[in-house]
Image (cartoon, grey):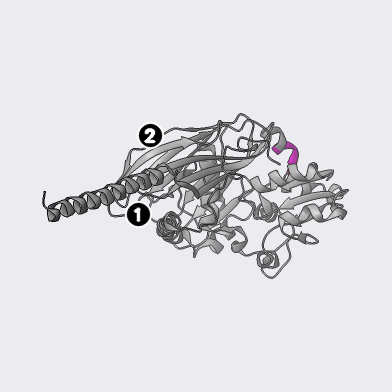
Amino acid sequence: MPIICQRGVSRAAAYFSRVGARLILLAISITARSAIPPTPTVVDRHDVGVAHVGQTLHHEFGVTNSSNRSVRIEGVRSLCDCLQVASQLDRVGPGAVAKLAVVVVPQRPGAFDSGVQVEIAGESSSRVFMVSGWAVEDVRAGVENWQVSAEELISHPAESRDVIFVDVRMPEQFRLGHIPGSLNMPLHTVKARSFLRSNRVILLNEGHDDRTLLGECLNLQGLSFTNVQVLLGGLGQWRRSGGTLEGEHPTSAALGEISPRQFQQVSPDPGWLIVNLTDNENEALATEASANLALSISADPSRTQTDLQHLLSIRGGARSPRRLLLVTSSGADYSEVEHILSGFHDAPVFYLSGGMDAFRDYERRQAATQNRHLVTQSNSENSPTRFNSSSTPGMFSGCCGGKR
């Protein structure tokens, strides 16, 4: 064979040898990358507040696809023995939100933090959805022991003389109106006030959500606080029951207003009755457990109060409402409604700040924010919420309760 041909064959063999080696290295690299599991990232957390051990808790998360193409769900797995996935996910259409239903049953007293992990094709970070709360042995018995009504305190002034009211609302709300002599402080600082340990302490907030206060009662009892209770219905029920208030505007309906965000956090509680005061009787708030009923406000206070009592009786029984939320179109008429309902004691009354318009606007902004949040977290290389080996749900005690 001519020398020139031998050289050509040798060069060709060397070339293909180099190409083959590169292909082998590329295959190894791809295989190694595909073997690396997606990094879990918390994208949503639902706090149920206080629950009892063995209670079945239901919740639905939204798995959002903010891209313009359909995505495939590669896997959904529970990170705790006490959490079960109740819905099947396969694909999520472009711009769509798939419902992820979970069932959680706390197994031990204490804080629980249960999670479910969703892996989506093409995303480097898997999404984790958490359900958290505080489990007690018997939440019903605890509530009876830890709550006190405004009527009971007002009707027995001698017994209430030595009570220390601790108002945990924001300072600007406290200045607007508060119980005379009450102390204003953040809830997490109460345990550091040693002078409260031997006194009868009554915790209060706006009254729309007492789950956090009830959980803190449990904590304080374990810290040698001998007599701590929660004011049922909060400041609004105190005022409606004839209790004295002082401040810059103690008669303002704003004391009973709650924001759309605050209501969304408590709306899964079936103890709410939403009363629609708008002109559109078909308008309703989208909630998980609360009931929506319509009512026309009459200029006659007694008639309006009778109508409210009738609505409460319709929703009576074991799951009867414990709180009313009144909603107008824009939230501009609450002062008039408050005047009409003066003296109504059947249930604590609250008003949705900004009315139905504000709630719809909040829903739109929340959906847009959630989409941006999910995209940012899935593409971030330095997300502070990524798990490491010491913080992955289900890998430590307390996932299903018992964490202190």
Q: Amino acid at mark 2?
A: Gln
Residue 66's tag is 1
Residue 53, by quadrant, is: top right
Residue 123: where, in percent of width, then height? 38, 49
Residue 88's tag is 2
Residue 224 as seen in the image, left or right of residue 213: right
Residue 49: where, in percent of width, then height? 62, 43
Which residue is farthest top?
54
Q: Could you classify mark 2 by the number of other residues whose Cα lies within 10 Å: few (under 14), some (14-19), or many (20 or more)?
A: few
Residue 139, by quadrant, is: top right
Which residue is farthest front?
2
Residue 52 as seen in the image, left or right of residue 161: left
| Element on which disc 1 rests | loop
Residues at marks 1 and 2, CA–CA distance in whole angstroms: 20 Å
| Element on which disc 2 rests | loop
Q: Which of the two labelled residues, at mark 1 and mark 2, occupies the earlier sequence position?
A: 1
Let me know if residue 307 appears in the view.
no
Q: Amino acid at mark 1?
A: Ser
Residue 218 as seen in the image, left or right of residue 360: right
In this view of the protein, which residue sits in the foreground, 65 or 220? 65
Residue 195: where, in percent of width, then height? 87, 55
Let me know if residue 273 appears in the view.
yes
Span shown in magenta: 143-147
Main SS, magenta region, reads helix
Q: Is residue 225 magenta?
A: no
User: Is 194 situated above or below 83?
Assistant: below
In this view of the protein, which residue sits in the foreground, 321 or 64? 64
In this view of the protein, which residue sits in the foreground, 307 or 37? 37
